[in-house]
Image: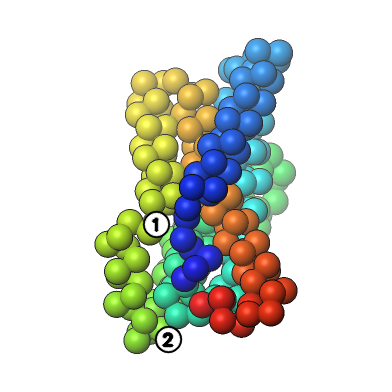
Amino acid sequence: MRELRFDRSFIVTMAIGIAVIDLLVVGYGLAFGFRRMAREDGLLELAQLVALAVSAIGFIALIPRVRHGGRIVASGAAALSILFFFREFETPIDNPVLDYMSNDPFLYLLSVVLGAFVIWQIAANWAHVPAFLGWLVRLGWWPWLAAGVMLIIGSAFEAMHMMFLEELFELNADAVFAIIAVTALGRTLGSARSPVGAHLVR
């Protein structure tokens, strides 16, 4: 699970990414209005969908490139990204299929399908579950934990009806998901090009 070890360079990348996003958002808000950005169909919502799409695609691409415990992590992360994407998904287009995809029944069905897929991956890599659990205990998943804290903070701002800050913290969390996916996928691609790549992608 080398590609899922997050060192100091990842912390710097994550911090820079979040800082750039926040500066762009604040700059746009000052120029065009924060309330306009925080609408359900506003720019922040669109940015969240883009970040979650990058995250989902990245983790889906990562699944066949990693093995053992790494595949369990990539599968779970892909499932979460897909669920979060469709939780945020809304469209002004009047279409029965798109309307269904933005409603709760579709989310319930999708949750069952994705849950079954993750369970299958766990069963297929059962011998490596202890290593996966050790990774969890060592808090190897701390970037996801950081993103979860951001989502909780966003929910607190939602309860206070501070919609802009809610959407901003959600965007930061989604950006962290995307940065994790891109970083891990980039590592596997780099390992595959190296002479010892076959030994590094685990």
Residue at 35%, 29% (x, y): give it.
Answer: 156
Can the viewer see residue 88 in this picture? no
Q: Residues within 10 Å of mark 1 (few under 14, many from 20)?
A: some
37, 12: nearer the viewer: 12
Regarding mark 1 in the picture, which secondary structure is present there? loop
Residue 111 pos. (x, y %): 44, 64
Residue at 51%, 77% (x, y): give it.
Answer: 202
Residue marked by disc 2: 124
Can the viewer see residue 49 in this picture? yes
76 horizontally vs 102: left or right: left
Q: In front: mark 1 or mark 2?
A: 1
Q: Amino acid under label 2?
A: Ala
Residue at 34%, 66% (x, y): give it.
Answer: 135
Residue 154 pos. (x, y %): 42, 32
Instruction: For the residues labelled 1 and 2, say whether their Cβ atoms are less than 8 Å apart.
Output: no
Regarding mark 2 in the picture, which secondary structure is present there? helix
Question: Height in image: 155 above or below 91?
Answer: above
61, 6: nearer the viewer: 6
Question: Height in image: 109 above or below 84?
Answer: below
Residue marked by disc 1: 141
Tell me the colour scheme of the image.
rainbow
Q: Earlier in the sequence, mark 1 or mark 2?
A: 2
Residue 157 numbered mark, or none: none
Circle count: 2
Q: Amino acid under label 1?
A: Trp
Residue 81 pos. (x, y %): 52, 56
37, 30: nearer the viewer: 30
Residue at 65%, 13% (x, y): give it.
Answer: 30
Q: Residues within 10 Å of mark 2 (few under 14, many from 20)?
A: some
Residue 72 pos. (x, y %): 44, 73
